Image (cartoon, grey):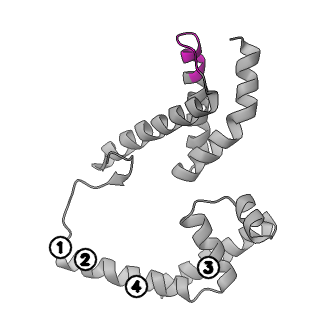
Amino acid sequence: MSGSDLKALYLAHRGEILDYLDRRLRCKETAADLTQDTFIRLSEQMGRTPIENFRAYLFSAARNLFIDHTRRQEHRKGESLDEQGNVGTEHQTPTLEQAAIANQQLATLNGVIQNMPAPCREVFLLVRVEGLTYVQIGERLGISPKTAYSRMVRALDLLGAGIAQ
């Protein structure tokens, strides 16, 4: 495969690989670095064995790079990944006091989210729970991405104000 073929694959799939990694990492710079690493892996693999589905290979390589990156980051913090690539602590059991504090914080957070205006709460949950982008939220809700963004900003302001009390 030629360099122009690799460039065409890069142009065709870069955006979706970058979005995939950014949703998981929540860091555009690291997502961009891992996206480049994904295409480097592709270019290295193309000379070794035939690849039948380039898109599937790219997502698999991106996921593996994400897991490797997260393992390195969490290793520095003393945490580990489970088999599905989810970050978890080393099975530390919280004390009763820690559990009570966590439950109180969770109740406060839940209360603030439930008391948000419905449009803000909806966008907040779509971003934080489902990992959607503002463009995807706009398409789903029939609003502009800027409106989705402004609702998220408002939700975060409400969240900050509600937790600070």
Q: Which amino acid does label 4 sit on?
A: Ala
Q: Which amino acid does label 2 sit on?
A: Ala
Q: Label 2, on which residue?
A: 99
Q: Which of marks 2 and 4 is nearer the N terminus?
A: 2
Magenta stretch in the rendered image: 42-51
Q: Label 4, on which residue?
A: 107
In this picture, residue 69 sits left or right of residue 25: left
Q: Residue 30 carries which label?
A: none
Q: Earlier in the sequence, mark 1 or mark 4?
A: 1
Q: Residue 95 carries which label?
A: 1
- SS at circle 2: helix
Tell me, yes or no, whether the two marked residues, 4 and 3, touch with CB atoms within 8 Å.
no
Q: Which amino acid does label 1 sit on?
A: Thr
- Picture residue at 23% right of the left edge, 53% below the top: 90
Q: How crowded is mark 3: few (under 14 residues within 10 Å), some or many (20 or more)?
A: many
Q: Residues within 10 Å of mark 4 (few under 14, many from 20)?
A: few
Mark 1 and mark 4: Cα distance apart in space: 18 Å
Mark 2 and mark 4: Cα distance apart in space: 12 Å
Q: Residue 161 versus residue 105: which sits nearer the camera?
A: 105
- SS at circle 1: loop
Tell me, yes or no, whether the two marked residues, 1 and 2, touch with CB atoms within 8 Å.
yes
- SS at circle 4: helix
Mark nearer the viewer, 1 or 4? 4
Q: x and y percent of residue 137 in the render?
A: 71, 65
Mark 1 and mark 3: Cα distance apart in space: 32 Å
